[in-house]
């Protein structure tokens, strides 16, 4: 599969980096900081406010998903705090086994990525904007968990490696400097800033 590389994304970002950064919604920073910070000191399965904000921000309140799925999701999220390197395949497989309203398993890899990203921003997000930025191919036509998972993991690893490369590229320093000017007082990890920038690039490309 030919996905956009670090070089491709750098060129697209640098074409008009101020436009990309200026369009990042402030809400994304506020909600991320809330979810990441509060997670450290709360018990997620019992924190209904935390769950409410998470559900709406990451679209966990999908009408096809059951209340049982939501309950299990936050229980699983709580369990992950004990792992230094959570296994996203295991998490996705666990969520896959919780049936939807029609009694079918559903592939919820983006929600698994959102869970891990909230806990630790070194795990990239994986939503429609990221998919657009990297020009990732859909898994919709693939049948079965294993085939879909193989495609998702390949794309997720590509995202991770690309972020590592971009974070070391001095050519992007003016972009991060503008980010800090645009959002003064927000102490975000550099990898989170990059994730927001790439996601907004993808949104702009739509």
Image (cartoon, rainbow, N blue to C red):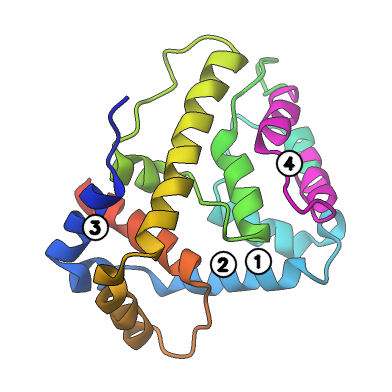
Mark 1 vs mark 3: which is more N-terminal?
3
State which quadrant residue 110 falls in.
top right
Q: Nearer the viewer, mark 2 or mark 3?
A: 3
Q: Toward the viewer: 201 or 27?
A: 201
Please tell me whether mark 1 sits on a helix, a strand or a loop: helix
Please provide the residue range marked out in magenta: 72-98
Q: Position of residue 45 (x, y in %)?
A: 84, 53
Q: CA distance from mark 4 to mark 2?
A: 19 Å
Residue topped by disc 1 = 35
Residue 70 marker: 4
Q: Nearer the viewer, mark 4 or mark 1?
A: 1
**In the image, 132: left or right of 103?**
left
Residue positioned 73% across, 65% down in the render: 49
Residue positioned 43% across, 45% down in the render: 159
Residue positioned 55% across, 47% down in the render: 59
Residue topped by disc 3 = 10
Q: Position of residue 192 (x, y in %)?
A: 49, 65
Q: Is residue 95 magenta?
A: yes
Residue topped by disc 2 = 32
Q: CA distance from mark 4 to mark 3?
A: 37 Å
Q: Residues within 10 Å of mark 4 (few under 14, many from 20)?
A: some
Q: Are marks 1 and 2 in contact (CB under 8 Å)?
A: yes
Q: Position of residue 101 (x, y in %)?
A: 67, 22
Q: Main structural element of the magenta stretch: helix, strand or loop?
A: helix
Mark 4 vs mark 2: which is more N-terminal?
2
Q: Are marks 4 and 3 in contact (CB under 8 Å)?
A: no
Q: CA distance from mark 1 to mark 3?
A: 29 Å
Asked if 111 appears above or below 96 in the picture, the reply is: below
């Amino acid at each position: 599969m030919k996905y956009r590389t670090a070089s491709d994304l750098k060129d697209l970002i640098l074409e008009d980096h101020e436009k990309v950064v200026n369009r990042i919604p402030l809400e994304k920073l506020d909600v991320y900081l809330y979810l990441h910070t509060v997670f450290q000191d709360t018990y997620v399965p019992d924190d209904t406010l935390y769950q409410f904000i998470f559900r709406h921000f990451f679209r966990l309140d999908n009408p096809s998903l059951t209340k049982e799925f939501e309950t299990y999701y936050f229980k699983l999220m709580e369990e992950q705090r004990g792992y230094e390197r959570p296994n996203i395949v295991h998490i996705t497989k666990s969520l896959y086994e919780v049936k939807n309203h029609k009694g079918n398993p559903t592939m919820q890899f983006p929600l698994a990525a959102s869970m891990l990203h909230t806990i630790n921003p070194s795990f990239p997000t994986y939503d429609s904007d990221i998919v657009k930025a990297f020009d990732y191919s859909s898994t919709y036509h693939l049948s079965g968990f294993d085939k879909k998972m193989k495609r998702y993991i390949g794309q997720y690893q590509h995202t991770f490696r690309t972020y590592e490369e971009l974070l070391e590229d001095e050519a992007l320093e003016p972009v991060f400097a503008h980010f800090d000017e645009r959002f003064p007082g927000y102490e975000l990890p550099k990898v989170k800033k990059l994730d927001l920038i790439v996601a907004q690039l993808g949104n702009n490309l739509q």
